[in-house]
Image (cartoon, rainbow, N blue to C red):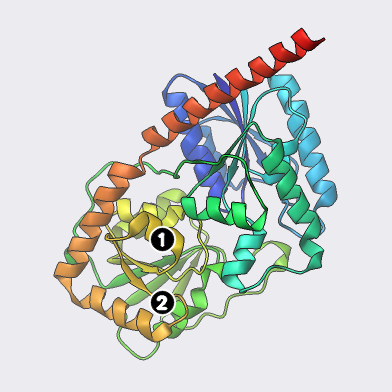
Amino acid sequence: MHILITTDVVGGVWDFSCALARELQGRGHRASLLAFGAPSAGQRQQAAACAETLAAEDLKLEWMQGSARDVQQARALTAETIERLRPDVLQANQFALGSAKASVPVVLTAHSDVLSWSKWTQGARPGSEWRGYEALVQEGLAGADAVVAVSHFLAGELRELYALKREVTIIHNAWPAPASMPAEVSRRPRVSLLAGRAWDKGKNIGLAAAAAQGWDTGRVLLAGPIRGPDDAQLAELAPPIEPLGALSQPELQSRLAQARVYVSPARYDPFGLLPLQAALSGCALLLSDIPSYRELWDGAALFFAATDAADLRRQWQRLLDDDLLACALAGEARSRALARYGPGHMAESYLDLYSSAARSRRAEVAQTRVAL
């Protein structure tokens, strides 16, 4: 099969797309990446190893304000690319493309959305200026041949917030394990790693900054961009947090291999590739107690209340001070990552869905011809 995968260059969708493309090609299929935005040099290098990359114009994404014209351009560009490449399936990772008039089956994967982000980050639905976005998401969910959610949590949010009635297939994200066995956390220095977009309120980096005050944390590193699209506000960071800026995948992997604890204070993270990468790298996971993290890591991580800096501080101190606890959790997290969130299982699940969607599309065409 030839699968055209749409992606963007802002967050985890890029890493997901590269991981999926790599596994599909490893199984003898062809994968092409249609990227909205300008990939960095590191991203281009990452993609070159896994797929044919077709960089698109630097268009605003559907969750950005004032993106209506860019969304239409993205749909048109996708349709043109389909007609030129003639893939067997479109793997869409943007809601707007679920309802694109594609001549091939469309599998739409939901990674996150503004309404559920606002619910878990702000405690309320967004304002009326997001009505157009809400309609766009509903159209995409209704128009795709098949819909995937990256967690049961996100599937439930789509059903509740967008009145979604159709079937949703759950396919967890995945990541390859490092080539070498990671060192035990007891042999690592007193280093904790935070990672993610510091400008995104859903990442809740400020809670970790508050929890790190007034005690010996050791080094606390923050990997990820500080300023976001649409000139989002800089996160308020203070020592001991050390911002590293955006890192390439090899750089991030190197940092994870040296960290004792991976900390995520996120209020909203429908799957979370970063905790998975940290688990595979042998870190002990210290995670906010949100439904998606419980779904994925219950019994393999230490949890804290996502709004309580004092609770985070207590659990953080435990992991840094208790070698037995840290080693046990790190081992359980890595074992779970290898058993449940491997790229091979993810790719096979998508291939099954692509074949099913293609069969359904052929049956619909046959019925239409008979009716005519």
In the displayed structure image, the side of residue 299 where residue 312 appears, left or right: right
The reply to whether residue 144 is visible in this rendering is yes
- Secondary structure under the numbered disc 1 in the rendered image: helix
Quadrant location of the N terminus in the rendered image: top right
Q: Give the x, y percent position of residue 343.
A: 39, 37
Please tell me how many numbered marks the rendered image carries.
2
Name the amino acid type tagged 1. Tyr
Residue 350 lies, in percent from the top left, at: 49, 31
- Which residue type does callout 2 highlight? Ala
Residue 29 position, x and y percent, is: 50, 20
Taking the spot 63% from the left edge, 45% from the top edge, the residue there is 165
Depth order, front residue of 237/165: 165
Residue shown at 73% from the left, 22% from the top = 103
Along the line of sight, the residue nearer the viewer: 66 or 368: 368
Q: Residue furthest right?
A: 69
Which residue does the numbered mark 1 point to in the structure image?
Answer: 293
**Residue that numbered label 2 is attached to:** 305
Q: Is residue 198 visible?
A: no
Which numbered disc flags the more N-terminal residue, 2 or 1? Answer: 1
The label shown at residue 95 is: none
The residue shown at (65%, 40%) is 35
Q: Residue furthest left?
A: 324
Q: Residue 3, relative to residue 211: is it above or below?
A: above
Q: Position of residue 81 (x, y in %)?
A: 73, 27
Residue found 82% across the figure and 42% down from its top: 72
Kind of element beneath mark 2: loop
